[in-house]
Image (spheres, rainbow, N blue to C red):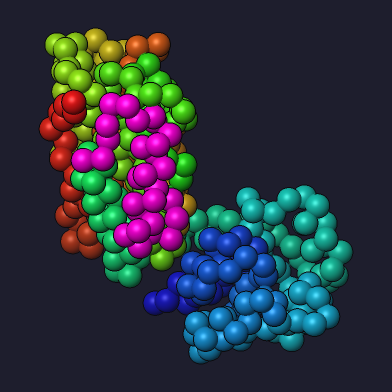
């Protein structure tokens, strides 16, 4: 079943006649076409990709004509949507409530008289993107392969006189050179005292001795990777070695516990209890992991705040990323991406080494 077919089936189940897709990610998920301006209109019968002159040639060349009719409306996109809704007798219309401002909602409401606009489009698409098919996994694998190769390269590139910002920029450039269409998120490359900030910003200052945490990811054909590795600039002392090994042990324990049906809160608790028991209670302040796909943060989540009934399922791609952060001193995080196969087996998609690495 294609993404579009699955979308139509969910529309039927919801008792809706159409879905207006306004987000770039939602449009690419359904059509596999990457463009900026326009909409996708899905009805139970026909589906339409609306764009303008800048993208029409590429859309006609790329989009599956058996699934979508490509339109470049001359009288305005909303007027075209209204016309197609009437043609398909679609009365109840879902929209992406998490992607649409109230002002845009009012514009749609005024332009589509007679339609019953309802939220629920965001939840529908999120529920579909939870489960990755083979093509999606192939793209995520490629994104992660680029990320792994970049980590190997950057270890040979880093020099003591460099700045955090220089290293971050080199990582991003190298991922681009390997085929990444962009970064999955703003690269984190933080050293010394800056590493105690889980999402610290690379500074234009010389690298500090101590832990150096790199959290980064590539994007390949619309799909992201996410990996964190922490190395030591200089030599690790006894406390640093204990902290690093605790983080690694917590990640290993959580990954080894993964199986279809395990509660997502429970996975978080496995790692958190180990960290707390090692004397670092209160030093692991974020969730253990999150889904990855076309967005860098998707469902499901390994977190104390995850829905109480959320469990790991076949098709999920999720990170496992425990960390320990000592404010004003340093921090350490290790992160891998995990995929759950159709037969229930769990695969670690990340292949970069996790032994403690000392540079300089």
Instruction: Name the quadrant containing residue 206.
Output: top left
Q: Residue at x 40, y 21 (%)?
A: 194
* In this rendering, position of residue 214 left or right of residue 346: right
Q: Quadrant of residue 320?
A: top left
Q: Residue 5 in the image: state x and y as whole percent.
A: 47, 77
Residue 144 relative to residue 78: left or right: left
- Where is residue 255 shown, x and y percent of the image? 20, 39
Viewport quadrant of the N terminus: bottom left
Above or below residue 265? Residue 111 is below
113 versus 143 height, above or below: below
**x, y (%) of residue 336?**
26, 42
| Image: 68 above or below 282 | below
Q: Is residue 180 magenta?
A: yes
Expressed as whole percent of the image width and height from the top left, the position of residue 56 reads 63, 82
Query: What is the total number of numbered labels drawn onto the structure image?
Result: 0
For this rendering, which residue is in front, 285 or 239?
A: 239
Image point (26%, 40%), residue name: 157
Pick the front one: 311 or 283: 283
Residue 45 appears anywhere in the view: no
Quarter of the figure with the C terminus: top left
Can residue 55 be seen in the rendering of this structure? yes
Q: Is residue 189 left or right of residue 71?
A: left
**Who is closer to the viewer here, 72 or 345?**
72
Residue that appears at 19% across and 52% down: 347
Magenta stretch encompasses residue 143: no
Q: Residue at horizontal 32%, vertical 27%?
A: 161
Question: For the view shown, which residue lies furthest in the front direction?
Answer: 161
Question: Most extreme residue toward the bottom, as rendered?
Answer: 66
234 sits left or right of 228 in the view:
left
Residue 77: which quarter of the image? bottom right
Q: Nearer the viewer, residue 231 or 43?
A: 231
User: Magenta span covers which residues?
Assistant: 156-183
């Amino acid at each position: 079943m294609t993404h579009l077919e699955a979308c139509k089936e969910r529309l039927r189940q919801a008792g809706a006649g159409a879905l207006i897709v306004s987000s770039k990610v939602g449009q690419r998920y359904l059509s596999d076409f990457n463009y900026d301006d326009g909409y996708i209109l899905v009805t139970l019968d026909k589906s339409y990709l609306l764009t303008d002159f800048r993208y029409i040639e590429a859309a006609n060349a790329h989009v599956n004509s058996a699934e979508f009719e490509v339109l470049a409306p001359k009288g305005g996109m909303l007027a075209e949507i209204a016309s197609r809704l009437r043609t398909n007798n679609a009365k109840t219309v879902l929209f992406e409530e998490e992607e649409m401002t109230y002002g845009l909602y009012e514009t749609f409401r005024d332009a589509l008289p007679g339609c019953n606009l309802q939220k629920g489009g965001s939840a529908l698409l999120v529920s579909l993107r939870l489960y990755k098919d083979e093509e999606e996994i192939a793209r995520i694998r490629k994104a992660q392969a680029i990320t792994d190769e970049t980590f190997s390269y950057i270890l040979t590139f880093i020099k003591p006189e460099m700045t955090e910002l220089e290293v971050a920029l080199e990582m991003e450039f190298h991922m681009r050179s390997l085929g990444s269409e962009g970064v999955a998120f703003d690269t984190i490359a933080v050293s010394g005292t800056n590493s105690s900030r889980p999402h610290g910003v690379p500074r234009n200052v010389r690298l500090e001795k101590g832990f150096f945490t790199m959290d980064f990811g590539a994007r390949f054909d619309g799909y992201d990777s996410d990996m964190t590795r922490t190395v030591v600039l200089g030599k690790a002392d006894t406390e640093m070695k204990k902290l690093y090994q605790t983080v690694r042990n917590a990640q290993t324990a959580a990954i080894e516990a993964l199986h279809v049906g395990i509660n997502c809160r429970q996975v978080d608790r496995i790692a958190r209890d180990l960290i707390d028991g090692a004397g670092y209670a209160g030093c692991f302040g974020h969730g253990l992991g999150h889904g990855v796909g076309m967005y860098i943060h998707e469902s499901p989540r390994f977190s104390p705040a995850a829905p109480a009934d959320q469990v790991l399922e076949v098709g999920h791609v999720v990170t496992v990323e425990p960390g320990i952060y000592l404010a004003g001193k340093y921090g350490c995080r290790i992160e891998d991406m995990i995929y759950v196969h159709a037969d229930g087996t769990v695969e670690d998609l990340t292949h970069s080494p996790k032994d403690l690495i000392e540079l300089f």
